[in-house]
Image: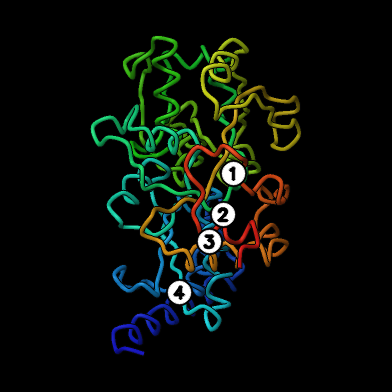
Amino acid sequence: MTLKLSILLQSRKQLWRSKQSKCNQKVFGPLGKILTHCLVAYFLSFSVAVSHGDSSFITIGTGDITGVYYPAGGAICRLINEEKEQHDLRCAVESTEGSAYNLFSLRRNEFDLAIVQADWLYHASRGSSIFSENGADDSLRLLFNLHSESFTVVARKDSEINSFSDLKGKRVNIGSPSSGHRKTMELIMRRIGWSEKDFALATELPPSEMAAALCNGAIDAFIYMVGHPNTSIREATTFCDSQLVPLPGKLIQSFTEQYPFYQSAEIAGGMYRGTDKDISTFQVRASVVTNTSLSTEQGFQITRSVFAHLDQFKALHPALRSLDWSIMVPDKMPLVPLHPGAKKFFTHDE
């Protein structure tokens, strides 16, 4: 082991001990931040920050620590690292702004893997929408699918926001500029003829800050494209009177008819405090992607590590519990080509 790697490993161990000590304290700060820090520490104990240039190490771009991408990416890395003696791969997980950021970074080979929304994967592969200036990225490859993510609107009950149109003139968090849900919100806004000027205030807070901003009265509502149940939304509905807001049926229909990656969906009533009825919306699939720089053998071992321990992977987060082979294995016409390593695993092509 090189001196540099040894130092990095030692620093991670020290960080884990520090975080673990805090986790053992029965002290929970506002909106459960210590619980979030414990989750981060848990995954840091299984991943090492390393030089991207070493082919034995892979990095995966995920999302905010309060969403599903980060724990899902951490679980993937954990499963890979637990079998490192078999395939000589090491994996590190990185929290990011989300799908759009991940796809731009993957194109620059700053990540080896990324978790992304299918809609932005579609646009990146075709050079459309926000990727038009960069052109089509024909190097993108799919490893496997993950959970579905629903477009979600959460509003304080005293804000008098009971429908999507009520967001107009309110203080709304529309998301970080490079997040997938921000880009989806902008797509909706263009569809209905809105701009940021139609809000009293349009903020760009990351998911980890949305619940606090809502409950502290800094904003009236926030939007999020995420798998359910979700930590930020649970915090917002637990610590202050807030509710989920449905999308209009015509908007859902127009999106699902025009785009192959959107499907109509409902967020089950009773999942969150304050929302007893099912909430109409649309959803998109999240996927684990890479590019042609990843070797066939690496793609095979990554895919095998997850599917060989699928029950363990699913147990990590409630949003992953419904996953099975029929969902995760790409269909015959995926948005981007299947990576040869994943294809080798799925077809048992030894």
Distance (Cα) linking label 1 and label 2: 8 Å
**From mark 4 to mark 3, how far is it between C-alphas?**
28 Å
Circles 4 and 3: CB atoms closer than 8 Å: no
Instruction: Say what amino acid the circle numbered 1 marks.
Output: Glu
* Element type where label 2 sits in the image: helix
Q: Element type at marker 4?
A: strand
User: Which secondary structure lies at badge 3?
Assistant: helix
Residue 287 is left or right of residue 346, and the answer is left
Are circles 4 and 2 on residues that touch, CB within 8 Å? no
Residue receiving disc 2: 32
Relative vertical location of residue 77 with respect to residue 228 in this rendering, above or below:
below
Q: Residue at x 35, y 51 (%)?
A: 106
Quarter where residue 264 is shown: top right
User: Does the image show residue 154?
Assistant: no
Classify mark 3: residues with Cα within 10 Å, few (<14), some (14-19) or many (20+). some
Residue 215, percent from left and from top: 52, 36
Residue at 31% across / 15% down in the picture?
197
Point out residue 283 in the picture as x, y percentages from the top left corner. Answer: 59, 31
Which quadrant of the figure has residue 243? top right
Which quadrant of the structure image shows residue 189?
top left
* Amino acid type, label 3: Ile
Of labels 4 and 3, earlier in sequence is 3
Q: CA distance from mark 4 to mark 1?
A: 34 Å
Mark 2 is surrounded, within 10 Å at the Cα level, by few (under 14), some (14 to 19) or many (20 or more) other residues, namely few
Which of discs 4 and 2 lies nearer the camera? The answer is 4
Q: Which residue is mark 3?
A: 34
First in sequence: mark 1 vs mark 2? 2
The picture places residue 145, in percent across and down from the top left corner, at 59, 47
Q: Label 1, on which residue?
A: 235
Q: Are discs 1 and 2 less than 8 Å apart at CB?
A: yes
